[in-house]
Image (cartoon, coloured by chain):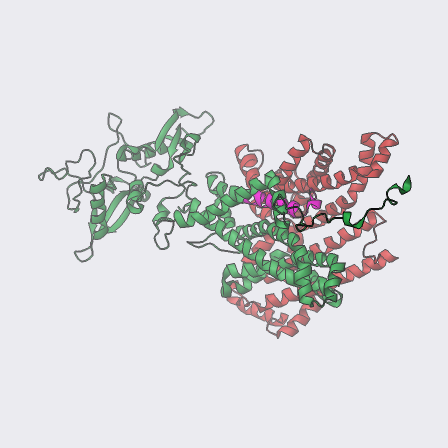
Chain colours: A green, B red
Amino acid sequence: MENKYTDMKIPADKFRFVADDNNLHDKRLETKPIGFFKDVMIRFCKNRSSVIATVIIFVLVVYAIITPLCFENKYTLSLTDTTYLNYTKLRPKSTLFAWAGWDGCINKTINASTYNYVRAIGEETGCKPIVKEYRSNYEDPSSTVDATYYDVKIDSYYQNGMIYMTLTEEQYKDIQTWQDENGIQIIYPAVDTSSFTVASYKSDANYWYKINNKGVPVMDKNGNYQSLYLQRKTDDYTSVMRIEGDPGLDDPNATDRYRYATKTGDSSAVSYKVRVFTYNYFIYRYGFEPSFLFGTNSSGQDIFTRLASGARFSFILAIAVSVVNLFIGAVIGSCMGYYGGWVDMTIDRLCDILGGVPFMVVATLFQLHFANKVGPVGSLLFAFVLTGWIGMAQRVRMQFYRFKGQEYILAARTLGARDSRLMFKHIFPNSLGTIITGSVLTIPGVIFSESSLTYLGIVNLESSTMTSVGTMLANGRGFLTTDPYIIFFPALFISLLEISFNLFGNGLRDAFNPSLRGVDD
Amino acid sequence: MYMFKYVVKRVLLMIVTLFIILSMCFIFVKLLPNIPTQQFGKDMALIAARREQLGYNKPLIEQYGIFITRTLLGGNWGVSETLYTGQDVMDKFIEKLPPTMMINLYSMFISVPLGILFGIYAALKKNKWQDHFISTAVMILVSVPSYVYAFLVQYILCFRLGWFPMLMDAGTNYFSWSMFKSMLPAVFSLAFGTIAGLTRFTRAELTEVLTSDYLLLARTKGLTKAQTTVRHALRNAMVPIFPMILGEFIGIISGSLIIESIFGVPGVGALYVNSINRLDYNFFMLLSAFYTAIGLVSGIVIDLSYGFIDPRIRMGSAK
């Protein structure tokens, strides 16, 4: 029975090649081959939170890049122009989200004299700062002062009201032409301030009406403000834009025509002191209505564009630091890991010493030494690089220790591969995953350190065109209770950035090294 | 005996490292332009004479020698030149230490129990919604910078609700109720991050231990889940957790510069920032030495504590 098959005698000519006529092939692969990075990509995309974090980072990067390019206008690029100083603490305003309270208004409780002061701006210009009155003219029982209060919603854009400006003849004419073309009045009649007793009232352009010594308006019998406009003098005001009650130029014989400027200087250098409505002046000056998405800070700078430039700086610094650290760390770590022995020992001691210096001390010393020579940015970069490469080098070294004893290295060496080839062709690619993850995870750390240093004022990057998130936070700190939005947007930005970079980095690490999943740090 | 040798070796290495770092700091500081005596006010001649006597005008090498003998060996860090003119740097530093340490100690007292509790809870509820919730919260809390908490605490708790004063009280009456109350905002701001960090660490360690074979054995022997968790799992998980806490405890002395600056804590951090802004080099040297030493010591203590907690771990052993 056993030998049934073996005993069979088959004639040789019965044998035939299986595939005599065509060559043998492996079956063609139906799917695309998946390489290492493709595999990583697939794993990364499965992690929902990391993908969301990537999107957020992308949005923040786009914001940092696009904003200075597209939204930078004359207002935000005011290097020598100090007009922005007149537009301080304008609230965040967005036409899209005005319904959600993002409308540039403040809810406030003000006393009667402030109320009348703000209301007068609206009376004169027609742009009413008081948008809504929640509660009018009530007495606060807990207050010891004899005063009445108003709960109101104030538009911070109109609230600034008038300022005095001194213009040259050219500027004065230009504004008038613009007024006539656009039908928006900028220049308002000059005021007779001789009845004001307090110096600060005289310099405040918002008092156009009769007031007493306390700054409280003296109303007429109908409860209206009594104007103190100056009349009848040559002011070279030819514009048709005139306020109500002014007979204008139509009647050449009118004697009660208002005066719009105080002319000083002789014919060679004439200058005009005028009362200018800041809101309309802004439109004239910059060509758009003032509306700041994130508001303006305490010195009148636009937070939206400033935050973007701070963000851009943070990104560039962090990426530069992580790239430089990656290079230095990779090269030194490779040498340490590959050669071992005394090379490893020496560099390890050096790492111990450098790693022992607190970063704060390094940053300070570099700042004191090099800030004058290479600028604060350069010295900050040096400080980050001086101790930053250690972590990377250690990581690369570990990988080298893992792989350098393996058979394939021995095989390559036997075939005559040089040290450098073994290091960078055969071993180094194995540590690529760790390196990429490591350098991504250094970015949030760098941004945090940079913002801390600039917050504390150890590093000062503030200038008219550049700022850093830390400086913005430090500047907003003083207005935390009165104007929290100044600090809110930078704080929100840096929190979002840190969260998403950490999520992104963790996702990347899980993707590159699935065995580490869930192990944090 | 082996352990003793290892400790001695580590401590000696630390001293050498500290010495090298301080020497570097010294040279860097000495290379900076010296502040002219005019800045100090009236008694210029006196200051110039004192500087001459202290060896400010000698060559760098000689000054370095003086620095080693007088400061490093003698413990005399000099007097303040700009910040607290004429006062001994060391005395002032010791005076500033308590507020910093107390704030950080309180924050540790809050965060260690809470962090471990949350960590245990998350580990026991692994992959359930509680765990996901805690993990997400931890991820956010760990990432957000501590000063953002400080702003939030200051705005919401101190300003809006008015529970605490905006800034820490001045004075040295550290154990009074009002002082304690004024410290709390800073304590909370510091605690958030530490709680989150500890929770994450505890959860990671505990989940690893909870899935191990000996825990299954303990359960099959008839121990309740609570018994296995507390007596077996947690003890083993504490091996890496405890050194971390210990390290933080040493680290707290150095404090947090930015939190101290936000809440006006009259501590070491403020002293450091002021010494830089006013270029008081003697303070700067002392505080640099201090921060460096704290970092080095906590590194050693962490390494050694592994061996003390779990005698099976022999640090630095060749095997």
* Front one among A435 and A420: A420
Residue at x 38%, y 52% (from the top left corner): A77
* Front one among A499 and A302: A499
Numbered range of the magenta stretch = A497-519
Q: Give coordinates of residue A83: x percent, y percent.
A: 34, 49
Q: Give coordinates of residue A258: x percent, y percent.
A: 18, 39
**The N terminus of chain A: image quadrant:** top right
Q: Is residue A44 left or right of residue A195?
A: right
- Residue at the extreme left of the image, as rendered: A253
Residue A35 sits above or below residue A417 on the image = above
Q: Give coordinates of residue A6: x percent, y percent.
A: 87, 45
Q: Is residue A440 left or right of residue B296?
A: left
* Front one among A92 and B50: A92
One can see residue B267 in this view: no
State yes or no: residue A511 in magenta: yes
Q: Is residue A430 left or right of residue B45?
A: right
Q: How many marks?
A: 0
